[in-house]
Amino acid sequence: MSSLLTNTSAMTALQTLRSVSASMATTQNRISTGQRVASASDNSAYWSIATSMRADNSALSAVSDSLGLSAATVDTQYTALSTVLGSDGNSGLTKMQSLLVEAKTAGIDRKKIQTEITQIQQDMKNTANAATFNGVNWLSATATTPTSVDLVSSFSRVGAVPTTGKITLTVANYSLYTATSSGFLDSAGGGSSIDTINIGALTDSAADQTTLDGYIAQVTGAINSVSQAAADLGAVKNRIDNNSNFVKSLMDSVSRGIGQLVDADMNAESTRLQALQVQQQLGVQALSIANQNSQSLLSLFR
């Protein structure tokens, strides 16, 4: 039946055109944002998971920054310990040990040797004082220096429970000088510390030779202690580097996981857009044809 009031064909064409237009809007939004799930209304489950994972990734980014800061701090302390140790044999404790052994030579001018020892003592103290990064110095500890420090190393979340990993270091294991004179170089052993050794007044007497032996043993003990401290910091630095690499890899993995959940397949979306554009054009054409049917009714009354 041909009806003037009800154009069934036009209604069908209009519904199809509306559906195609809605699909086009969805596809164009995916293309413009690059996301298949851009809001909770697109897919509430995937959107919620992706939001939580993005928060985790942000926390991992903070851990990565913290590890970078920790690595710089540890490297500063390690460099200073190596300098105090005097691995090249021409400075630091290694040179002091050589000078003390040389001072055991009969008839040698120990005042001149002491002049060089004094310079080494001052240089080691200056090195310890300068080993500061971002206001942190473990080698020259003051009354306000904490007894231990925690370096953030990792972050994880199981369900709704977050866990932050840390590397705990005891400052006393690396201190050369402290406010209470309990460091490797300022603690008194046998009446004097490494920092106050003075051989200028010693002679070739047996008692003074015994004193020199005590100084040599004291410096040797300090070399062993500082070497152990440097080795510990080297191990910590290696651990920080490994954690830093792992955190960066983990961040990439989480980003890939988020992408698989919410990113749009641009190849599929471009193909879908072209198909929808054709459907839209055909829908407009069908609606135009349907609207012309009512015009054909006029010929019945001529």
Image (cartoon, rainbow, N blue to C red):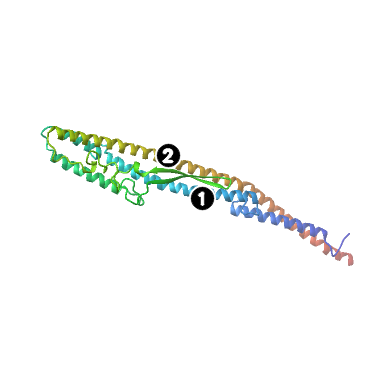
Tell me: 73 left or right of 276. Answer: left
The circle on residue 58 is 1
Tell me: 37 left or right of 216. Answer: right
The circle on residue 239 is 2
Label 2 neighbour load within 10 Å: few <14, some 14-19, many 20+: some
Residue 288 position in % (x across, y down): 76, 60
Question: Looking at the image, which is closer to me, 294 or 261?
Answer: 261
Q: Nearer the viewer, mark 1 or mark 2?
A: 2
- Check the picture and name the quadrant holding the C terminus: bottom right
Question: Looking at the image, which is closer to me, 43 or 280?
Answer: 43
Q: Amino acid at mark 1?
A: Ser
Residue at x-position 47% and y-position 49%:
62
- Check the picture and name the quadrant holding the N terminus: bottom right
The reply to whether residue 89 is visible in this rendering is no
Mark 1 and mark 2 residues within 8 Å of each other at the beta carbon: no
Q: CA distance from mark 1 to mark 2?
A: 22 Å
Residue at x-position 89% and y-position 67%:
301
Question: Looking at the image, which is closer to me, 258 or 277?
Answer: 258
